[in-house]
Image (cartoon, coloured by chain):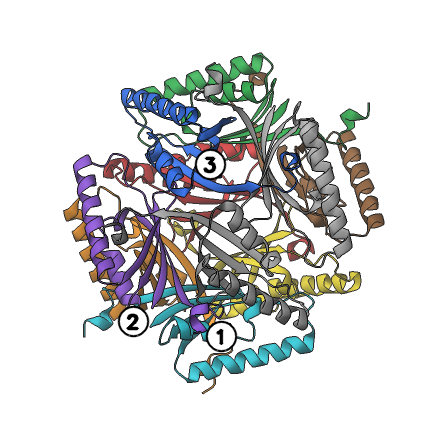
Chain colours: A yellow, B red, C orange, D cyan, E purple, G blue, I green, J brown
Amino acid sequence: MLYAVKMDVNLPVGMDPEEKSDALAREKAYSQEVQRGGEWVRIWRCAGQYSNLSIFDVSGHDRLHEILWNLPLFPYMDIEITPLTAHPSDIALES
Amino acid sequence: MLYAVKMDVNLPVGMDPEEKSDALAREKAYSQEVQRGGEWVRIWRCAGQYSNLSIFDVSGHDRLHEILWNLPLFPYMDIEITPLTAHPSDIALES
Amino acid sequence: MLYAVKMDVNLPVGMDPEEKSDALAREKAYSQEVQRGGEWVRIWRCAGQYSNLSIFDVSGHDRLHEILWNLPLFPYMDIEITPLTAHPSDIALES
Amino acid sequence: MLYAVKMDVNLPVGMDPEEKSDALAREKAYSQEVQRGGEWVRIWRCAGQYSNLSIFDVSGHDRLHEILWNLPLFPYMDIEITPLTAHPSDIALES
Amino acid sequence: MLYAVKMDVNLPVGMDPEEKSDALAREKAYSQEVQRGGEWVRIWRCAGQYSNLSIFDVSGHDRLHEILWNLPLFPYMDIEITPLTAHPSDIALES
Amino acid sequence: MLYAVKMDVNLPVGMDPEEKSDALAREKAYSQEVQRGGEWVRIWRCAGQYSNLSIFDVSGHDRLHEILWNLPLFPYMDIEITPLTAHPSDIALES
Amino acid sequence: MLYAVKMDVNLPVGMDPEEKSDALAREKAYSQEVQRGGEWVRIWRCAGQYSNLSIFDVSGHDRLHEILWNLPLFPYMDIEITPLTAHPSDIALES
Amino acid sequence: MLYAVKMDVNLPVGMDPEEKSDALAREKAYSQEVQRGGEWVRIWRCAGQYSNLSIFDVSGHDRLHEILWNLPLFPYMDIEITPLTAHPSDIALES
Amino acid sequence: MLYAVKMDVNLPVGMDPEEKSDALAREKAYSQEVQRGGEWVRIWRCAGQYSNLSIFDVSGHDRLHEILWNLPLFPYMDIEITPLTAHPSDIALES
Amino acid sequence: MLYAVKMDVNLPVGMDPEEKSDALAREKAYSQEVQRGGEWVRIWRCAGQYSNLSIFDVSGHDRLHEILWNLPLFPYMDIEITPLTAHPSDIALES
């Protein structure tokens, strides 16, 4: 099942530098692990923003929630979720 | 250059049925032509909405504008554009 | 898979009375058919609003989209979708 | 009387870990007590959000307010309330 | 049970004058009948707006919905509902 | 002159408990004094919210401002003011 | 009693030219009559907008409502009202 | 050149009392100096709000910016600016 | 005096084609005349939108209002105005 | 490729004065370096706001992101980006 997920990151202003670089490193490792598992199929940076737009392909809502809830930066994120389906004009459906 | 584009369609309530089916047919043909050309790289339907989320890969703003401006349904659309760049956690960058 | 769906209905001001009562009758019949099929598990009226809050339990986004897209009143609706998962405090999980 | 209640939780960034786990434990115990009493009839997690959607069936506004006001996490919540009534298309009304 | 209800009226621009004056007369008669029945306990005009703020005291959501749904101007209204309870500082509670 | 006033209270998260209970006690005493003086004619709690809806009947804007500005919780409040007038459908005007 | 009033005008797109010029003439005459009476003390055009910002000095809410409700363009206006009081830094209070 | 300026003040919750009273005294002195110079032509308190509505008559944007930027409370303000012009219905233009 | 002006165009859905092409031609001619006069110093199309972002350099609010008010498409536009001043980091100020 | 970029600066209330003046100096130096390189083609202060409106002319999204992400004040900014293209009415296109 496909989901578009927009994540806006708001790190606290006075965050401890070590805590911050640790959180960022864990975030990257976690994201890449889920990417390698094939569930986090695309991730783009939104230009000029501390935000990403991602596409997830997972078994369903439960798994999506589990992945997002365990993001090391989850407590600092605003997350917007859009369930996606096939579009009737998609040429991939024609073949 | 990559752009995420969200298109919300609001057809006029009393639209002539023939005019409508004609516009929809032209929209689909146009979209598929641009998809086949490799510039409209993905299109998904947002579940439960008369909306799509698309990814465009074009030479720049001018070409993106040209494509969108010529959509047969452009006069009935609200369009939101997000310029995308590579994300440092993207595993595609690791290889 | 569970979804909360809020539907706000905005019938056009000058809608033909016959067309309107026909659309409402088809909407009710359609809704009840999907309810009887077990996919539209709950429907409530939001008090004082031309709106409903519904719970759907369907196989996934594709089926949810199919159901909503075919609502006779779909062209007159604003629809908001929230994917639902189990809540860790739900006592139903304890048994 | 039925109410849909959406609760968004915003825990303070630097919350003391012990205070936090204590508050979460008390929140869960309190929620389950009200669920067992039959007034908090459904609770779902909104996927990818620190939010829940709940259905309450209580004697009226006073009791609803009393339940919500005493939530251990109430000071950290944004709460949205929708009074619900029977929907004329509900098949449960047909029997 | 008490509810604050804000009603904003948006009559269609080209509304037939006779239809309009008829609807307004029926709206007034209906409102006054419910006021006399003791359920529509207060109604104020919001200064400079085609809006009113009202207080309803009814048996519950079902009755509130029934009253509002049958307002002759209901199709032209935006309605906002706030369930009210006693306030602990209210001196009426002290006596 | 009548005003509807909605007050939303946002106490700071780490507020000193003693300072808080002192502020709440002073708020209640102050509110009740103005109620007894006949200027704060109604106060309701909005169910499930740290908010109240109040009706003031004062000599004019200056006095309303003076009352609100001196609320002990004023620095923690978002306040929305609606000037009220008689409604032509009010049955109280008929007698 | 002083009020700041912001009026945004939205004339219907297909308004009959004669009806329009008549309404505009009546609006101007009405406005100037109330200005000459000393109640509509200032009126400015918001640059680049079909809007005005006005200051009214009237006996109270009832009179303000009466003036605004009878504006020939009232059915086409969005109106925002701010009750004003003396500001403690105003040098006019020093003399 | 005329500008309407709305200033909303949000003092930090835990502001040092001495620092606060000093800032308020400097704000008042500064405001009155600009008023006496004839550039800050009106200032009103918005009733029930920590806000003012002001009218400035200055040589242009540069001077307006200079005045506002140097307000002692500028770091705590949300400011909204509306450039004003003469209104064709203003009776002051008739003489 | 500099102003940034964002213009969003919303042509009516059923606009007569001749009337439309005439209005567009007049809009272009008018815009270019003001550009040639040196007051409309820049105009860009916002990519994928029926909108432009423009920079005006005019004698003041009155002239800006006159230019915008007389745009042939003014009745169909939403306009947002930002007065601009020199920025202290602008290297043009260094020379 | 052209982008309009609006930057709103929100410095933390209790920011250390030395840290602040250092950040501002680095921001200015960085901005001027990018201006001298020809990529940050215009910067204006929005009158009465801690905001700027800028025009960037860069090779594409990647470079725009790189420039903005490295702004010393980036962590304190809200940034809004509008991709710009040529406007068909621009007289610069006529020559």
Residue sitting nearer the eye, A88 or G43: G43
Q: Is residue A50 left or right of residue C7?
A: right
Asked if badge 2 and badge 1 are on a common chain, one would say yes
Considering the numbered disc 1 on the image, is that residue within a helix, a strand or a loop? loop
Looking at the image, tell me whether mark 2 or mark 1 is earlier in sequence order: 2
Q: Is residue E15 above or below residue A29?
A: above
Residue I27 picture location, percent across and down: 45, 19
The amino acid type, in three-letter code, at marker 2 is Gly
Considering the numbered disc 2 on the image, is that residue within a helix, a strand or a loop? loop
Numbered label attached to residue C38: 2
The amino acid type, in three-letter code, at marker 1 is His
Which is in the foreground here, disc 3 or disc 1?
Answer: 3
Residue at mark 3: G5
Cα distance between the residues tagged 3 and 2: 54 Å
Q: Is residue E50 left or right of residue C86?
A: left
Residue I70 picture location, percent across and down: 46, 19
Residue at mark 1: C87
Q: Is residue J30 left or right of residue J81?
A: right
The amino acid type, in three-letter code, at marker 3 is Val
Numbered label attached to residue J68: none
Instruction: Report in which chain the residue with disc 3 lies.
Output: G
Residue sitting nearer the eye, D85 or E93: E93
Cα distance between the residues tagged 2 and 1: 22 Å
Q: Marks 2 and 3: in contact by CB < 8 Å?
A: no
